[in-house]
Every structure is written in structure tokens, then in C-alpha cells.
Image (cartoon, rainbow, N blue to C red):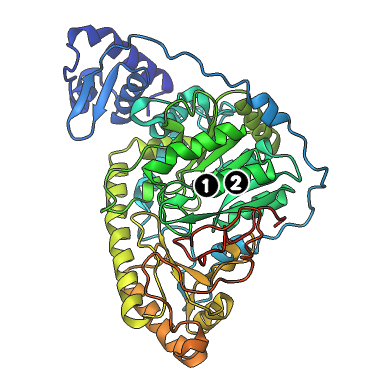
Amino acid sequence: MYERSSVAQLAESLRSELNRYSVGGKLPSSRALVERYRVSPVTVSRALAQLASEGLVVTRPGAGVFRAQPRTETEAPGDTSWQELALSADGAGEVIPRSVDASGVLNTLAAPPPGVIELNGGYLHPALQPERAMAVALARAGRRPGAWGRPPMEGLPELRDWFAREIGGAVAAVGAADVLITAGGQSALTTALRALAPPGAPILVESPTYPGLLAIARASGCRPVPVPVDAEGVRPELLAAAFEATGARVFVCQPLFQNPTGAVLSAERRGEVLRIARAAGAFVVEDDYARALAHEDAGPLPPTLAAEDDAMAQGLVVHVRSLTKATSPSLRVGALAARGPVLDRLRAIQVVDSFFVARPLQEAALELVGAPAWPRHLRAVAAELRHRRDVLAGALRRELPGVELPHLPSGGYQLWARLGEGDDVSFAAAALRAGVAVAPGRPYFCAEPPAPYVRLSFAGVSGAGELAEAVHRLRTGLGAGLGAGPASGLGNVSASGLGSAPGSGPGNAPASGLGSAPGSAFGNAPGSGPGNGVGRDA
């Protein structure tokens, strides 16, 4: 392997020769550059990435590298002075709890007993992981001079630049200087919430949402406040009411393939969510956990919220990204992207907590995403996840028609299934006795659920055959343990697509502080308001 200086030298050589090409002109192929300069393909890839980050060239997959249109003006720095007030807001004086409830997280992390089919996990099965490419990347990274030395506290510059390009998209809204490398997405979320909300403060979250987020908030002494989602993501009118009712300064969301519902924040709502947060003087923490898990039929993905208009320039969005979900639970490399004084606070908290992310892991991640095997892996995962989704959904509809699927996602690794009036905990227990591990829906709500749900993951099994077997076991086990009639919670469920069944669940009193609202597309009964009472402690 060549040292990092080789990348800089090659980038300088290419930079000096750009004037030989007209704007839009194609540069020599990577193979030609390897032969001409006698460097490795990785060195060429990193040098071209450096030129792309400077706006000098544009890469087009499958077509090549082209000279970019020269930049005519420099973007004026955004006004981040509003953050001083948001970052200094006092909490209610509550003490950070010493005990932490990790049950919602452990349910998806614990390995099932032998013989049990895992539909409750949150990671790719080894058959879907790029194990060979990761092994090669790790071996090459370990041999790199300096790989076992101390890295920059913010992360390797090249890796920060890669994340910046991934997050900022075509508009280049994010620069490498805005990025902090973290030890995975969970670590990034923990750092973000510690930086943005004092103990006792309310934090607005989607309802339902990722249990790990609720665990982080509660462990930090904060109060998660639910804001319902429907098929188009969080409901803006309820988000505005929640900010007004609670005075919260933080909203955490997953705009793309929300966990667990799979919803995508609609184009109409994206700007509205940012406008509402800006009016409240609040941060939006964007957890973009599943962008690399888009299914083959997903179509073009929307840009990140961080890339919207002036959201990043004003420091409104704190973006979280991770490589873990698309690779391996042990490749814990992620990133935080932010701008303004909050970035200094995020950096300080991470340094105090863990100093930095291990350099060999960063080097390995850089090798992996720069290898030709990386895009091939993402295409293979996209095709397989789509196939598994269709197999699982089809089997559920054939063998368990009483289990309603409110939404068929085009990304992510899970189905969110409604059980009617039954008990999700009893369902999960009966499923485990039948040899299938599923995740009960209750931990995904920070107040009373509007209806019983379970989350069924299709990423952690060995293949589609295991999914079919799991549904067969569920039908057998549920028939013996819960019955097939209405009392089982699986019968008489409205086949309403994204609509809700009559009758609200517990905790849906209209006097919730947000007034009455139409039924949520994910299960709130008509007139139930937000379903979870934003004005209350949860």
C-alpha cells in the first residue's frame, strides 16, 4: 500500500493538468491513471474523490470522471447565532437516572435460542454481509503505515470527506469540516442528545420510533414526547403543536424508511418540518440509518434534510449516518454532520467519552467504500431485501390474513404488522414457543400504543425459505396458543390499507393538549388526537 502522501501527490498532479480538458471533458480512466502514475487503484480513487470534494471534477458511475463547471462564487456562511439560546436552555433540574432500561434494545440484540428463526434482529445475516470485501479492506488497512497510530480526533480526513459527499448530495451542502466520525449510529445519537438537551428536557420523537432512541433519551434524563407518524412521515400539524405545548428544542426523526413503519417523509412535508423547527428555535436530528438499505424498486431517493435549502448553513440539522446496517454489526463506523457551535460541543462530548474511533476501523471503512466491491454489494442487498420483503408479506397475507400490513416499505429491513385488538406481548411469546422470535411493538412507543403491533425483520435470516418457514410456524403456533377467532386479536381486523380500525386503544384521550385530529394512517382512531398525549411526561 502507498502512504497517504501518494494520494496528495497524485491529486496535485491531476489538479495541474485539468486545464488540458474543457469543461465537461472526460479524464482518463482509472486504469489508465494507475498505469501512468504507477499507483494503486485505491490511490487513484482517493485522489479523484479529493478533486470531486473540491468541485473540480464530477464522477458519473459507469461513465467516468469529467471536469466540473468552475465555481463562480463562495456560499456565504449561514447565521447560526440562534444556537446560543437553544444550547443554553436550562433543564428542569432532574437528576440523570443511574439505572437504564435497555429492554427494548436487548430484544433486538440478543441472539435467539438454537433452532429459533430470528425475525427480531436489526442487522444483515452473514449471507448478506460483504464479508470477503470487509476482510480484504481490514487486511489492507492493517498493513498501511501509521494505521495503528493515533488518528485525528475528528476522524480521518478522507473518511470525513466521503461522508460529507454522501450526506450533502449533489448540492454539496456538507463539507468535510462539518463531519465528525463516530463509533456507529447509536454512539452518534447518544452524543447528539447529550449535546442538545439537558437532563429533564423534553425531546420530540416520532411515534412509533426506534427503542434505542427512547433508551438514550431516558438514560440522559430527558423526556421523550411522541409525535405520531402516518404513511407520509411525521404529521406537521402535530409537530407544531408539540413544540408549542412542550417548549422542546430537539426533534429526532428518521425521514427515510422510518423504523419501524418504513414510512418516507413526503416532499410536501420536508420543508414544513424544517420550517416548524426553525420557528421553534429547535434542532432536527436526522437519523438516516437506512439510506444504504433502499430496495431495488425504491426509485430515486430524496436528498437528506441536511441538503435541503439552507438547513445546514443555518445549523438547523444534525445528521446521523452509519455504515453498520449495510455491512456488519461489528463495523461500527458512523458520522455526525453539523455546523455552528453545536459541532464543537459534539466533538468535546465524543472526546471525553471515547477519545476517537479506532484508526484501523476507519482505515478499513475507507478501503471498503472505495473498493469496486462496494457498489456491487449495495446492488445485491437492494435486490435481496426487495425479494425477502415480498416473500414475507406474501406469506403473511396467505397464512395469517388477520395480521394487517399497513404499509409495504421500499427500504429498510422490517414489516410493521398490526394485530387488531390482541396483545403484542402474548403474540411474541406464542411465536417464540413456535420457534420464531419477533419484536413486540410496545417498546416502540413512549406512551400507550394506539393498537397492538409487532415488528418482523427479514434481514437476519439466511434466505427466503426461512421466511416462509417462519410464517408457517407462526400460523401453527398461533392456532394452538392464541386461537383463530376474534379473541385472539388476529380476527376481525379492518382490511383498510393504511386506515385504522374502529375504536382507539388506551392512552388516546382527546384532552391531550393537541386537540382532535383525523385518524393516523398507522392506527389512531378517529378523534383520538395524536394518540399519545404530547403534553404529558412519558
Q: Height in image: 5 above or below 512?
A: above
Q: Quickly name the residue at label 2.
A: 241
The amino acid on which the numbered mark 2 sits, given as a three-letter code, is Ala
Mark 1 crowdedness (10 Å alpha carbons): few <14, some 14-19, many ≥20? some
Image coords of residue 338 (percent x, y):
54, 29
Q: Residue at x 31, y 28 (%)?
A: 45
Q: Residue at x 65, y 35 (%)?
A: 350
Mark 2 crowdedness (10 Å alpha carbons): few <14, some 14-19, many ≥20? some
Q: Height in image: 503 above or below 232?
A: below
Give the side of residue 46 with respect to residue 38, left or right.
right
Q: Height in image: 181 above or below 438?
A: above
Classify mark 1: helix, strand or loop. Answer: helix
- Judging depth in this view, the residue of 431 and 14 nearest the camera is 431
Q: Are marks 1 and 2 in contact (CB under 8 Å)?
A: yes
Image coords of residue 440 (percent x, y):
55, 70
Q: Height in image: 31 above or below 222?
A: above
Q: Is residue 361 visible?
A: no
Classify mark 2: helix, strand or loop. Answer: helix
Quarter placement of the N terminus: top left
Image coords of residue 343 (percent x, y):
60, 27
Quarter placement of the C terminus: bottom right
Residue 237 numbered mark, or none: 1
Image coords of residue 376 (percent x, y):
27, 46
Residue 206 numbered mark, or none: none
